[in-house]
Amino acid sequence: MSNGNALTTVNPQILSAVETANNAVLGAAAKEASAMLAQMAAQALGIAIQDGVDHLQSILTIDSAVTGKALAMIIAGDQDQNAAAAIAASAAAVASAITELESIGTAVGQVIGDLGSV
């Protein structure tokens, strides 16, 4: 008949092997998770910057068209006040897009700094 103790006693070598395997897996998991977090954050931050640049480029394209049309109106002597107002509004849109891109850059820098502590 089998001894009751034999079922509850585990070979110390088995315990050591399981403990070593757990430490190897769990120790690497934290580093891998941090690396994956940094990679995903970098990708998202890159997309945010690209979107900000694309927005600014779109605004600059519109600004160029508005300015060209407004100057043509001024040269033709038509609606000088409307043309000047259009140029001012377009310049304000460009300034706003630049400010937005600067804000994105600041936020990205802050996130990158925060990731250094993860």
Image (cartoon, grey):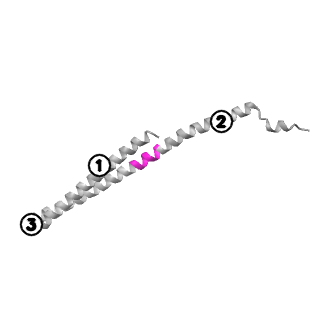
Q: Give me the C-alpha separation between circle 2 and circle 3.
A: 82 Å
Query: Residue 34, percent across and down?
Result: 50, 41
The answer to which quarter of the image holds residue 112 is top left
Q: Which mark is residue 5?
A: none
Would residue 93 be visible to someone looking at this image?
A: yes
Q: Specify whether 22 is left or right of 103.
A: right
The front one of 65 and 89 is 89
Q: Which amino acid does label 3 sit on?
A: Ala
In terms of secondary structure, where does tag 3 sit? Answer: helix
In terms of secondary structure, where does tag 2 sit? Answer: helix
Q: Residues within 10 Å of mark 3 (few under 14, many from 20)?
A: few
Q: Is the magenta stretch mostly helix, strand or loop?
A: helix
Identify the residue shown where x is 42% and y is 45%: 42
The front one of 55 and 9 is 9
**Would residue 39 be counted in the magenta stretch?**
yes
Label 2 or label 1, whichever comes before in sequence order: 2
Q: Specify whether 114 is left or right of 76.
A: right
Which residue is under mark 2?
21
Q: Give me the C-alpha separation between circle 3 and circle 1.
A: 38 Å
Identify the residue shown where x is 17% and y is 60%: 88
Which residue is under mark 3?
76
Q: Residue furthest bottom?
A: 79
Label 3 or label 1, whichever comes before in sequence order: 3
In the image, which residues are magenta? Answer: 38-45
The front one of 69 and 5 is 5
Q: What residue type is labelled 2?
A: Ala
Q: Which amino acid does label 1 sit on?
A: Glu
Kindly indicate whether the residue at mark 1 contacts the one at mark 3 (C-beta within 8 angstroms). Answer: no
Identify the residue shown where x is 73% and y is 30%: 13
Which residue is under mark 1?
102
Query: Residue 78, percent across and down?
Result: 10, 69
Q: Give me the C-alpha separation between circle 2 and circle 1.
A: 48 Å
